[in-house]
Amino acid sequence: MPKILEKITLAPKIHQLRFCVPELVKKALPGQFVILRANEYGERIPMSIAQMDKKKGILTIVVLEVGKSTALLGSLKTGDEISDLLGPLGNPTEMKLFGTVVCVGGGIGIAPLYTLIEGFKSLGNKIITIIGAKTKESVIKEEELRKISDRVLVTTDDGSYGIKGFVTDALKELLKNEKIDLVMAVGPVLMMKAVSQMTKAYNLKTWVSLNPIMIDGTGMCGGCRVLIDGKNKFACVDGPDFEASLVDFDNLIQRQKCYLQQEKTAYARSNQR
Amino acid sequence: MPDPISVNGTANQKKAEIMQLMQKGRQISRTPMPTQEKLERRANFKEVNSGYSPIQAMLEASRCYLCPKAPCVLGCPVNIDIPAFLTLIALGDFKGALRKIKESNSLPAVCGRVCPQEEQCEKVCVLTKKFKSVAIGHLERFVADYEMQSGEIEVPELPPPTGKKVAIIGSGPAGLTVAGDLAKLGHAVTVLEAFHVAGGVLMYGIPEFRLPKGIVQREITYLKKLKVEFRPNTLVGRTVTIPELFEQGYDAVFIGTGAGLPQFMNIPGENYNGVYSANEFLTRVNLMKAYDFPHYDTPVLKGEKVAVIGGGNTALDAIRSALRLGAKQAMIVYRRSEAEMPGRKEEYEHAQEEGINFNFLTAPKRILGNPDGWVTGLECQKMELGEADESGRRRPIPIPGSEFILPVDIVIIAIGTTANPVVPKTTPGLSTNKWGYILADPETGATNIPGVFAGGDIVTGSATVILAAGAGKKAAVAIHSYLGNLEKSTELLRENQKQIQG
């Protein structure tokens, strides 16, 4: 059973977990994800790979507590074990020399930017990173991303740190002043939708990493289907990256609300214990 | 034709005993399978069939005519010596009967429950001309369960290790069969499974009320006793690839990855909340135990009115699961007629008893939803049967103007699967057909890559547990012979080298 090598709380309700899983890490590439299960009663939870240390075989994921399962993961401590960890899953992000790549991350979508930037950077791309959070205290990974990016812009919804506003406000300015070759966005669906709408006007190549509800992650269940250019694609085997302009974000938003009621029930029940 | 009764020792004496029993005690009617009361079982996931008692089993087995041609053996995809095991049951030697079955089939407790016997061994039973066939499936199940209830599982003595390593990809019926057969021949077998538990479709697909998960896990435990190693959470193609398995020292690989991606119909409304593929719905309910939510964390939407599209076993499993989750109305929507329905007869009868509605000659046209994106109905069209199509079944043709709306809140699509691309895409040079299924020799499972074998749904497309097990059986024989030849060729190579060096 995979053991938590280290658990750090990065911000309120945001936790970083590290596992030593050399076989998985050896194969993992930027843009891929894993599925984990905390215990024998647990859900299978898809999680982006935040970082991977190929030499030491260490995998890093970042969890935001939103419901029972993620709260349970958040309550685990260094040295605890989880029952299952499967991966790497999904297709890696297409890595090549584009020129200037803008990497946009919102919320815990900031975390997986690290491996993506490492990848793009190693191929000679110039990296401008935009990260957004609700408040100053929920900005994560800023220092680490500064080390590997050419420029980092931070936005907060309430203006308590960096630029006041959303990641799209920072992106809007960049689009005016910079020649950009690719935008890669990872984060809440609403954010990815806003980024997509903005870059569409500039006819700018934009990729999003989608995070639909998923069970097996191997193509078997079809629960993660997303409408891409009007056709159903499975995020686990066809994605998770898709050309942003082709994504039906509204359908994804609707489908993510499928179990809101059940999630509330489960969360309330777990809090009573 | 060899004597169908292959009982060891005092064969003639025993044969006489049986003949006497069979002549005296022969009953004409088939022993009905005891089942859980239909109103009760509608509300629980416990197994529907409760199994024969020893007396019932002996009586039922004694109905066998021991006809010399034994058409049942040919009707069985893995050619179990059916008259021989029925004879042993009639004699009360239940463990002997199980050993006889296991010579040909490693998964009797499973196949006794889920095989479409009425299309195979029981279809050709000579008794069917006048009476109902011998309940071969129920008896196969009985002896497997008898051993389980009696405690200790009999494990054959293993031969000395051959030193050969085989990787099995997927732990469904094909993979488990190959694993068991090769382990019994002394090879070191590792089964790689993407899910967190082994069993494949037997765990995620077939519901508890038809195949209790404890039964599947018992088969896995048996294989572990045969020194088969199971590695869950390993997706071949991602965690490790087939070329890497050879680099790691495996001498042969069997691909038994099973059914693939669920098909959708490409009708409007398929992405509303409340539309499931049968694979997703069943995986949530069976593998993730969503019927026991919130005790288990995985949820499933419970509908008041549920429609399942399709007429196969998966469709029946899905609708009967929806009923057990509390649906007030549970219905099948199938575009052909009752006669063309591919599902098992017993399951169809059980479903009818439980109150499932069947809308035959009905095809879905679109799924209706409310502005928030939740399913509200299914628009259907009535069909009539035309000329036979390439499958030999009469083709359904829409009747113009016959559209109507079924008010439902859950729609489950059970119309089949397409090949999963993960293994072929990550195995350079592996040949597939135009639909993406792996090309393998039907007699040996050999693919175009030496040492790589395949069988089950990833070769044939969606089929049955026993056909997958049968493919596994053949592949195991072929892999064993491949490994033997490998040994010989290595020896030859060493010999040559010695000569060259000498």
Image (cartoon, coloured by chain):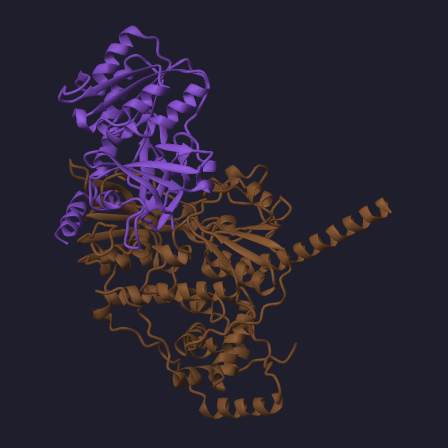
Chain colours: A purple, B brown
For the image, the number of numbered tags is 0
In the image: residue B309, left or right of residue B57 = left
Closer-to-camera residue (B101/A58): A58
Residue B372 occupies which quadrant of the picture?
Answer: top left
Residue B65 drawn above or below residue A112: below
Closer-to-camera residue (B370/B184): B184
Residue A71 drawn above or below residue A145: below
Closer-to-camera residue (A85/B102): A85
* Quadrant where the image shows the C terminus of chain A: bottom left
Residue A135 occupies which quadrant of the picture?
Answer: top left
In the image: residue B284, left or right of residue B458 = left
Whole-percent x, y for residue A260 in the image: 17, 43
Whole-percent x, y for residue B437 in the image: 51, 44
Whole-percent x, y for residue A122 in the image: 45, 20
Kindly give the residue lying farthest to the top in the view shown: A177
Whole-percent x, y for residue A129 in the image: 31, 18
Going 23% across and 30% down the picture, which residue do you hit?
A250
Residue A134 drawn above or below residue A64: above
Going 26% across and 22% down the picture, which residue do you hit?
A131
Q: Is residue B334 visible?
A: no
Q: Is residue B333 visible?
A: yes
Kindly give the residue lying farthest to the right in the view shown: B502
